[in-house]
Image: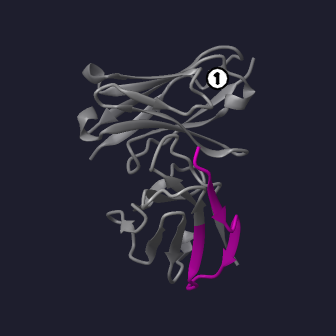
Amino acid sequence: QVQLQESGPGLVKPSGTLSLTCVVSGGSLSSSNWWTWVRQTPGKGLEWIGEIYHAGSTNYNPSLKSRVTISIDKSKNQFSLKLSSVTAADTAMYYCADEAEIWGQGTLVTVSS
Amino acid sequence: DIQMTQSPSSLSASVGDRVTITCRASQSISNFLNWYQQKPGKAPKLLIYTASSLQSGVPSRFSGSGSGTHFTLTITSLQPEDFATYYCQQSYNTPRTFGQGTKLEIK
C-alpha cells in the first residue's frame, strides 16, 4: 500500500525559498502517472500547486509558475517542491498526493521572520 | 483557469437525512470530476472519481452524478462520521482547480 510523507522546514523567512520533500513508501514512483502538490489555507481553500510525471515533465499553476519548481528523484523514490520568494501569503498546509487517491498527512509551513 | 463553484457553502442536516451538494464548472469538463471529503486536521479523502465512480472502500451511501458543467454529490442516510467538508475538483486540465468547499454540519 503506497504511502506518502511530507518533510521540510516548518518555518521559512520572507523572501526565502520553501523546500519540501515527499517520500513514497510501499510502492514506486512509477505506480502513478502524476505526483502532485496541493496547499490549503483557511482563506483560499485548496489550491493546486503543480504536478510532475514520473518521467519528469511538469505542469504548474500559472498563479505560482514563476516561483515553483517540482522535481523527482527516482533513486530516493521521492519528489520535491521548491517555492521561491515566499511571503506570508504562502503560509499554508502543504500536501503531496498522487493523481487523486493517495495523500500525505500534510505539513504546515509558516512564513515569518 | 476553470472555475469550480459549489453550493451551498454550508449545510445543516440530521443523521439519516439525504443531502445533495452541487458543483458547477465554468466550462465543460466532460466527466473529469472528483469529490473529496475532509475532516479537521486530516488530508482530503477521495470519495468519487470521474463524476460517478465510487472509490474503493467508500460506503455506497455516497454517489455522484453529472457531466459537462453540472455535478452533484449525494449522501443518502447521513451517518455521524459524514459530517465534514466536501470539495469537488476538476481533472480535465491544469491547473486542476477545486471548489471552495461545502461544510456539512449536524443540525
Which quadrant of the figure contains the N terminus of chain B? top right
Compare residues A113 and A72 and report the one nearer the observer.
Answer: A72
Looking at the rendering, the stretch of residues picked out in magenta corresponds to B1-22
Residue shown at 70% from the left, 46% from the top: A42
The chain letter under disc 1 is A
Residue B49 drawn at (x, y percent): 40, 60
- The residue nearer to you, when weighing A61 against A94, is A61
Kindly identify which residue carries mark 1: A11
Instruction: Check the picture and name the quadrant holding the C terminus of chain B.
Output: bottom right
Vertical side of A68 occupied by B20: above or below: below
Applied colour scheme: one colour
Magenta span has A60?
no
- Identity of the amino acid at label 1? Leu
The reply to whether residue B85 is visible in this rendering is: no
Q: Is residue B99 left or right of residue A82?
A: right
Secondary element at image label 1:
strand
Does A102 sit left or right of B94 as displayed?
A: left
Residue B82 makes an appearance in the image = yes
- Is B8 inside the magenta-drawn segment? yes
Q: Position of residue B78 (x, y in %)?
A: 54, 79
Q: Which image quadrant is residue A40 in?
A: top right
Left or right, A78 with reference to A113? left
Q: Residue furthest top?
A: A16
- The image position of residue A36, as x and y in percent, is 44, 37
Q: Is residue A8 above or below residue A26?
A: above
Residue B12, position as x, y percentages in the image: 69, 75
Please tell me which residue is depicted at 30% across the width and 36% down the height of the picture: A25
How many residues crowd mark 1 within 10 Å: few (<14), some (14–19), many (20+)?
some
Vertical placement of residue A14 versus A94, above or below = above
